[in-house]
Image: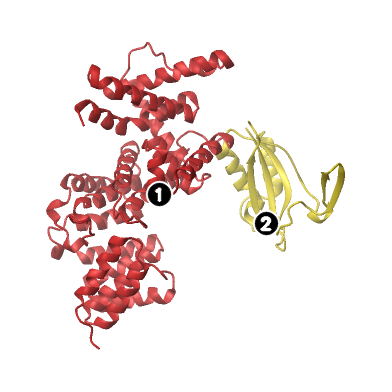
Amino acid sequence: MNGAESAVVTVFREEWGRIVATLIRTTGDWDLAEECAQDAVAQAVARWPRDGVPRNPGAWLTTTARNHARNRLRRAGIEAGKLRELAALPDPEAPVDEAADSGIDDDRLRLMFTCCHPALPLEGRVALTLRTLAGLTTAEIARAFLVPEATMAQRLVRAKKKIRAAAIPYRVPPAHLLPERLGGVLGVVYLLFNEGYAAATGSQAIRGDLCAEAVRLARTLARLMPTAPEALGLAALLLLQDSRRAARTDADGELVPLDEQDRSRWDREMIEEGTALLDAALVRRAPGPYQVQAAIAACHATAPTSDETDWVQIAALYARLARMVPSPVVRLNRAAAVAMAEGPAVALELVRELDGSGELAGYPLLAATRADLLSRLGRTAEAARAYRAAIDQAGTDAERRLLARRLADLGPEEP
Amino acid sequence: MRYMLLICATDGEDAGPDDGTGMTIEQWVEEYDRRGIRLEGDRFAEPSDATTVRVRGGEVLLTDGPFADTKERIAGYDLLECADLDEAIEVASKHPMARAGMVEVRPFWTG
């Protein structure tokens, strides 16, 4: 890829959401906004290699997209007499005013809240966020969620239609709705990250693109809402988790467990950015689940070696998280931390309680955790049975292979 | 933007919505009439009093009862004029039947 092409890709990633958000505000037309952003990118691809990359590529793309919108509206306006919308657009002849563009970030925030409106189905929120804010194509989103492209296109069409037909507002919600609605926005970004990180089904263990987009969105949210502790907490959490991406799989694409990862391959810059965001969140003294999870991730990220991990602190944080989020998965993670802090026997008791409750029936990590604990207690035959159950339930091939390795490591089973 | 609130009650459940929290129906009507948000509204007779009309092959066919025979029934409606969906959701969430039954917020066709 030559310089001009990579400049287009970089600017595209950074600017797409901004351009679409601004055009939606000025035209009220979601499809028009996307098409004009696309036209501007196509024009950059054609021109920059020939004419050179403009000094301010982002402003160039924005202005070009606005001109496309103005021209399209002018044509439509002559036919339909929609001059009101035309007048609402900024003067294309005016020089690009960088200071005036500071309002554009607010547009992106508006767009996030609208895309993640709770009146839209969750899958529509996720698709719309990736399409309009991250600029992924319908085909890319369809691939990421393992559905046919036509299905994904339908989701996007329906979501956009409902925004228009039901008059879902294009704005950052007023103060009394903000905490609840922000939770919804953060939830979508978190889901995106987890889709990429865990890749619940399929053969590819980590779909890095989704993780990268989620990190980008979380960073943007943290920058735009610096006084919202959970927005900072989510950005911190995702950065700290994603800092391990290079070390999570080996050369053959096999998953590498945390305690076996090469910590020199963890991304130090992301860890520093993540811990700084977490500190900024914690001083606001309004703890929430994302901040606690980020604190747990920070314990791992800042431990020089696996043996030096502060498991007592991690187990305490999981206990706190379990009080905030009554989820059996959190209790299972707590059990794994307790195993390290207080020994496998105590943890096995917690796992047995979870098992008895039936809340995690069929969840592969329950069997896998029980297997690990039994193995550490030297109860090899029971451990082998639990590993086999976990292998049957595992969602990805990489998980299955990791579990199979652990099963093999148990050695010969006693008769 | 106009929205219709379809007030839904569930058969077999007590229609008396007042659990002591939030507005009574009288307070709700008064509040949103005063603010010019509720344009009109009323309560329906029982679904068993309904007659469903179809014309097939030029013939008028009548059925006793509502067109959808479900446990849920539409007990009434309120017509709202709101700025956007958020306002309509807020008004609907204050309706006492949102606590006792449920309320569908349906925008009017805008083409």
Q: Chain of mark 1?
A: A
* Residue located at (51% from left, 44% from top): A120
Write down which chain is painted yellow: B
Task: Please report the residue visible at 73 percent of the width from the left and 53 percent of the height from the top.
Answer: B68
Mark closer to the observer (1, 2): 1
Which quarter of the rendering shows the C terminus of chain A? Answer: bottom left
The numbered disc on residue A159 is none
Question: What chain does badge 2 belong to?
Answer: B
The number of discs equals 2
Give x and y (percent) for residue A58. 30, 25
Q: Position of residue B34 (x, y in %)?
A: 68, 36
- As rendered, which of B40 and A200 lies closer to the eye? A200
| Marks 1 and 2 belong to one chain | no
Q: In the rendered view, tell whether residue B34 sits above or below residue A195.
A: above
Q: Is residue A315 visible?
A: no
**Label 1 with label 2: CB-CB less than 8 Å:** no
Drawn side of residue A303 relative to residue A24, left or right: left
Chain identity for the colour red used in the image: A
Q: Secondary structure at mark 1?
A: loop
Q: Element under label 2?
A: loop
Q: Could you give the CA–CA distance between mark 1 and mark 2, rounded to whole angstroms? A: 44 Å
Q: Residue furthest top?
A: A93
The type of residue carrying mark 2 is: Asp
Q: Which residue is mark 1?
A: A145
| Left or right, A228 with reference to B110 | left
Residue B46: horizontal and vertical position, in percent? Answer: 80, 54
Residue position marked by numbered label 2 in the rendering? B18
Answer with the quarter of the image where residue A70 lies. top left
Asked whether residue A375 is in view, the answer is: yes
